[in-house]
């Protein structure tokens, strides 16, 4: 499978994706395949674990569900069948409030909140390609977490369906998730490498 996905001119669908080796992690964005290896580094996983913990604690007993990667999120462009979808991503964290979007395969349609944690192999894709795709798909709030610089960039979808300039937070901040009033993230705990 690896050699097929390296051909830039090839375009793939979710139907193709489902046939690939389960021991490899891939994402499809507009039909282009992106290998998700190497595995995330320990700092990435510590940050992921703390963010997931804070979100799960807030949503316990509420209707929204919190998922950590690997978790497939398929983003149809129109009303195409599952097999023809050309974008399937694995965000580090997804919060989905419409439980009808969650099925056996993952989530079909835009989650309400997506969080991506930068790593050297995915930083460019998360900050550019995925940012545009999440905006186009209607992800209401998108967080990009930079564990090296201990910074978070928060994009909020406007009423006209575009992300404005990001709000920027540093380690000493405790930003509120705008679409979920009362959900405050303690960034000092998130960026504690020994959490």
Image (cartoon, helix red, strand yellow):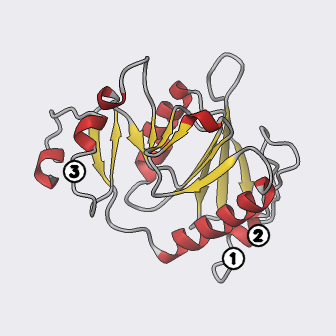
Please tell me which of labels 3 and 2 falls first in the chain.
3
Where is mark 3, residue-wise?
A: 20
Judge by depth and name the residue closer to the eye, 83 or 55.
83
Give how far across and how far down residue 163 sits, in percent: 63, 29
- Secondary structure beneath dot 1 equals loop
Q: CA distance from mark 2 to mark 1?
A: 6 Å
Q: Position of residue 39 (x, y in %)?
A: 37, 68
Q: Label 2 neighbourhood size at 10 Å, few (<14), some (14-19), many (20+)?
A: some
Is the residue 86 above or below the residue 169 in the image?
Answer: above
Label 3: how many Cα within 10 Å (few below 14, some 14–19, many 20+): few
Question: Closer to the N terminus: mark 1 or mark 3?
Answer: 3
Badge 1 is on which residue?
Answer: 192
Residue of label 2? 188
Q: Quarter-wise, where is residue 10 in the image?
A: top left
- Local secondary structure at mark 2: helix
Q: CA distance from mark 1 to mark 3?
A: 37 Å
């Amino acid at each position: 499978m690896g050699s097929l996905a390296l051909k830039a001119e090839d375009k793939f669908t979710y139907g193709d994706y489902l046939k690939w080796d389960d021991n490899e992690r891939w994402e499809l964005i507009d039909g282009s395949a992106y290998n998700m290896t190497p595995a995330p580094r320990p700092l990435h996983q510590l940050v992921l674990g703390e963010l997931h913990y804070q979100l799960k604690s807030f949503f316990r007993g509420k209707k929204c569900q919190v998922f950590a990667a690997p978790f497939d999120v398929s983003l149809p462009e129109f009303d195409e069948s599952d097999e023809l979808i050309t974008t399937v991503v694995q965000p580090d964290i997804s919060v989905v409030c419409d439980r009808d979007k969650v099925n056996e395969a993952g989530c079909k349609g835009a989650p309400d909140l997506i969080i991506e944690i930068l790593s050297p192999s995915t930083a460019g894709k998360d900050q550019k390609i995925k940012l545009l795709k999440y905006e186009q798909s209607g992800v209401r709030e998108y967080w990009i977490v930079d564990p090296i610089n201990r910074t978070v960039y928060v994009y909020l979808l406007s009423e006209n369906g575009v992300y404005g300039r990001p709000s920027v937070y540093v380690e000493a901040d405790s930003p509120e998730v705008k679409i979920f009033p009362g959900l405050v993230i303690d960034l000092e705990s998130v960026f504690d490498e020994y959490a």
